[in-house]
Image: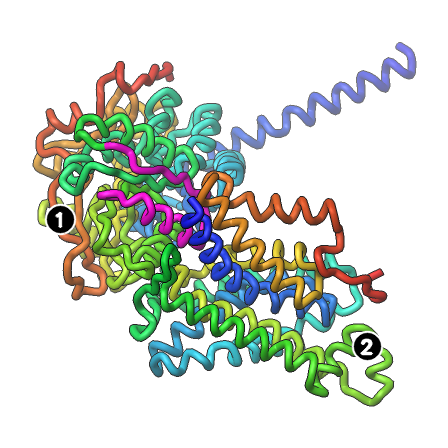
Amino acid sequence: MTEIQRRNRAILRLLAALAAVPAVGGSSAASAEDAGPIRIGLIYTKQGPGAAIGEYLQRGSALAVEQAGGKVLGRPIELVWLDEPNPQVSQQNMQRLIDENKVVAVVGGNYSSSALAMMSVANREKIPLILTGAAAREITGKDCSRYTFRTQATVPVQIAGLMPYVSQLGKKIYFITPSYAFGQDILRSARSQLPSIAATEAGVDEVPVNTADYSSYILKIRQAKPDAVIGGLVGGDFSNFLKQWNEMGMKGKVPYAAVAVTDTDFWDVGPQASTGIFIKPWYYDNPQNTAAEKKMTEDFAKKYGQPPSDKTWSGWIGMRALLESIEAAKSTKAQDIVTALEKWKNAEGKFPFYFREWDHQMVRPAVIVQVKAQISDKWNYFDFLKNTSDTLADTEKAFGTKEEIGCSMPAL
Amino acid sequence: MLDILVSQVANGLVLGFVYVLIAVGLSITFGLLGVINFAHGAFFALGAYFAWQMYHWFGWSAVVLAPPLVGLVGMVVEATIIRRLYGKEPLLSLIVTFALALLIEALIRLVWGADGKPFNPPPVLAGIVEFGPLLITKYRVAVLGATVATLLGLWAFLAWTPYGRILRAGSRDPEMVALLGINLSRVLTAVFGLGCALAAIAGVLAAPLWTVSPSMSANAVMPAFVVVAIGGLGSFLGAVVAGLAVGVVTSVTIQFWPEAAAASMYALMFAIMLLRPRGLFGERWERFE
């Protein structure tokens, strides 16, 4: 053997030894993890206009962990919370939670665009992901994934719940929606349902995210003279709109209706500027809330001195579903958790709700609320009108058939 | 169609005045100190929060205390952090003030919470005024008046008072001013405080229009930079002309091509930068050459 051959063999041996190190380290880390805490990732917004929403989602998830005694499978739960500032960073944070924090599952994703980006990582890395806010239809539709579950009702379901109320307001409808996946879904869904209420389109504005001044849009709406406006603006953008809608004398003149709003949108602007009919996943002052939801409301109020927002509920139910599924699976293996989530069911209410096995959409009615004529409580802005559906059969029907949804669920 | 156009142009001019007020403080800080203050939007937000707090403690009249208080905060920041950036690379001031912006936003969130604060125009300014096709709210008329008064006062101060002359001279030739026995260090502290107080005035005036939340600075800082870049760094007149142009272009774009509204001000900046890289009224400044 020549000197060169000997040296090459030595280099190869060294490379082989180096390559073996992560495998050895990985297996020892895995065995240490079996006895240590179970880490669960959270991806909720920490900065920018969505920070308040992120905080309520995180508090809801943390409360579910507290209510479970901080443990699952007898092991302590460790929550790791990373930011959801935009799709790109949300996707990177999803990867970080998996690679660096070794989480067994992730709960989070308030924005449809971020959720779609996070889903690709969850699918590739085979890690369960429960989305607690995103509403765009493709998440459980054509882009559905075996590892992704979603709690929020889809846009078409919410629009279908809203339309009967819109039909009572008039026949000329103006749309003002955010210019990304969620807003485009609102437009598609509402336009397709306009003929069913014999209404026509008075105008459309797709508004860029993070718009501060809506006065020019409001002037356009005023010029179009619609009977009602259907909106879908989110977070700080919606709060800015409501404030200027009131400032420009439109409150009380043209009714406003929207889907997927959250309590903080209204708490941020106050009673003076709040107006409209809305679809929300949940409301703390709904007389039909279950005992567990009332207990969550109580625990939250005790801890933070105020009622929870619907986002708190979303973070809470997402985490509850995950923890109960881990317990049912008696395992932290991704495939076992996914199988248990597919069988998870909550039977605390009038009729059960669950993640539908063939698209992983939570099948549960949303609530329809209207801003009170007189708001006297700092937090209680809405009158509960009704649920989007009142029976299990109607709810299942509202969420669409396999053919309508278009999800081809891949194998585990 | 003409009615619609006139209405949107008028609305854009009013919006433009808000942009002018936000941008002029940034322009002055750069023009007189040579510091690109990325934290300008954070002082804008601080102004809105101080106004909200003053209103809740003492009522509407106390809101006027917000800008001087923010100015004082700015002077402390200048004395402890900003003065170390003088004469250094502009990139360094950008990085340090960016960190400062994040710090102030985090402090706002810590003190006042992540939720927004309800804050509406005072009852006396509620309602709208209509002149033919024009619709404007009484509050926006008041904003217009307050902005014009602030800008005129600032111009008179810089152009006609001895203190203003020292500021302008110090910005062009600090060594000569120091040789004349003037304590330039104090002058520079006051200039930074003035820039922050102007951001705060904009924050106070915008608070009843925009949501008062920790992230509201993001809505202010980018238009401010665009206005300053279009108008020319350090140019007072440039900030005024560019602010109004940005307001009008944004409003008209919303009318005819709403999807492009956010991009319209950047398109305007791009066009101006191509034609005149120094901005509309940007001058050659020896110290920046």
Q: Residues within 10 Å of mark 2 (few under 14, many from 20)?
A: some
Q: Are marks 2 and 1 in contact (CB under 8 Å)?
A: no
Colour pattern: rainbow
Q: Which residues are magenta?
A: A200-228
- The residue identified by callout 2 is B174
Q: Check if residue A217 falls in the magenta segment.
A: yes
Q: Give the residue type at disc 1.
A: Phe
- Residue at image point 17% right, 62% down: A375
Helix, strand, or loop for circle 1?
A: strand
Tag 1 residue: A384
> Is-magenta flag for residue B135?
no
Chain letter of mark 2 equals B
Could you tell me the amino acid type at mark 2? Pro
Q: How many marks?
A: 2
Let me know if marks 2 and 1 both belong to one chain.
no
**Quadrant location of the N terminus of chain A?**
top right
- In the rendering, at what x and y percent does residue A228 appear? 23, 43
Report x, y in % for residue A270.
28, 62
- Choose between A261 and A65: the one closer to the eye: A261
Evaluate whether residue A316 shows in this view: no
| Element type at mark 2 | helix
* Residue closer to the observer: A64 or A20: A64
- Judged left or right of residue A353, residue B145 is right
